[in-house]
Image (cartoon, grey):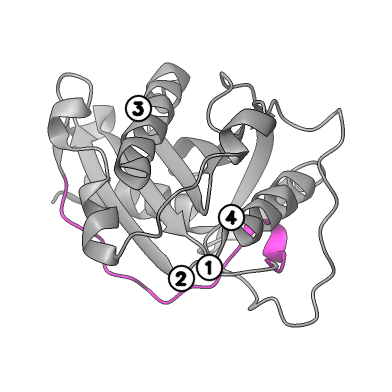
Amino acid sequence: MSRTVTILATAVTAAITLAACGGDGGGAEPPPTPSASAPATGPTASPAAATYKRLDKAALTQALLPLKSMPAGYSEAPDEEDDGSDKTFCNYRQPHTAKVEVSRSYQKGGGLNTEVAVVTLRQYGSADQAKASFDKLAEVLQTCRKDTLNGQKVTYALMNLPETGEASLGVRIEMDNGTVLQGFALVGPVMISTGAGGLMSADADVVASLLGKQVDRYSAAALA
């Protein structure tokens, strides 16, 4: 992979990993439900009534979006090695950590026009744990605006996305190496995230489309 692609892949993967890490929940107070000013969220009553199976790692990996579901021009990208970072948005402490986490990376174009996309599924111990983690993420992003990631100064801004899953939100991440757009959705015991970024541009429509597709694919696997 070229240096440009490596930098972008690392930036996107690091940005997406932000919400995956954090505390083990010991002694954490229950996070408040996002207020009316929080990012747009979908309906909770009907989807929450569904019972989703807990999937093992192999089945959860199978539920990730495949290459054929990506927009034209994307190809599979080599997996980035886990650097062991426990960075979260503005260093917040999550109430719970995911029991199983899987992701897949894709890339498009080359040189300065390189774009990278990542889809991730994080399965928690229960639907309640997943909801508490999502609610805390939404709460933190109400005030988290500036941060440091891998030595870079980054800025965050809430981003509007179509409603999907039981709740959803979007965030724009600006850094020296480019722009990353990220979407999150809550479905049963899983927090779904999709992200896309590049040096020259980042497409919110791609993030929104992938998030909707990933919600549908995971739901089909976990409700089967």
For this view, does 10 lie left or right of residue 72? right
Q: Earlier in the sequence, mark 1 or mark 2?
A: 2
Give the extent of the magenta segment: 77-94
Q: Which mark is residue 218?
A: none
Asked if the residues shown at circle 1 and circle 3 are in contact, with their CB atoms under 8 angstroms apart, the answer is: no
Closer to us: mark 1 or mark 3?
1
Q: Position of residue 75 (x, y in %)?
A: 12, 35
Q: Position of residue 44 (x, y in %)?
A: 67, 33
Q: CA distance from mark 3 to mark 4?
A: 20 Å
Q: Earlier in the sequence, mark 1 or mark 3?
A: 1
Quadrant in which the C terminus appears: top left
State the residue position of label 2.
99
Q: CA distance from mark 4 to mark 1?
A: 7 Å
State the residue position of label 4.
127
State the residue position of label 1.
125
Three-letter amino acid code at the position of disc 1:
Gly
Identify the element where label 2 is drawn.
loop
Q: Earlier in the sequence, mark 3 or mark 4?
A: 4
**Taking 47 as reference, is 209 above or below it?**
above
By secondary structure, the bulk of the magenta-drawn segment is best described as: loop
**Count of numbered marks:** 4
Asked if the residues shown at circle 1 and circle 2 are in contact, with their CB atoms under 8 angstroms apart, the answer is: yes
Identify the element where label 4 is drawn.
helix
Three-letter amino acid code at the position of disc 2:
Lys
State the residue position of label 3.
213
Q: CA distance from mark 2 to mark 3?
A: 23 Å
Three-letter amino acid code at the position of disc 3:
Lys
Viewer-side residue, 204 vs 217: 217
Three-letter amino acid code at the position of disc 4:
Ala
Q: Residue, x 73% and y 54% (percent of image)?
A: 136
Q: Can residue 44 be seen at all in this image of the molecule?
A: no
Viewer-side residue, 213 vs 205: 213
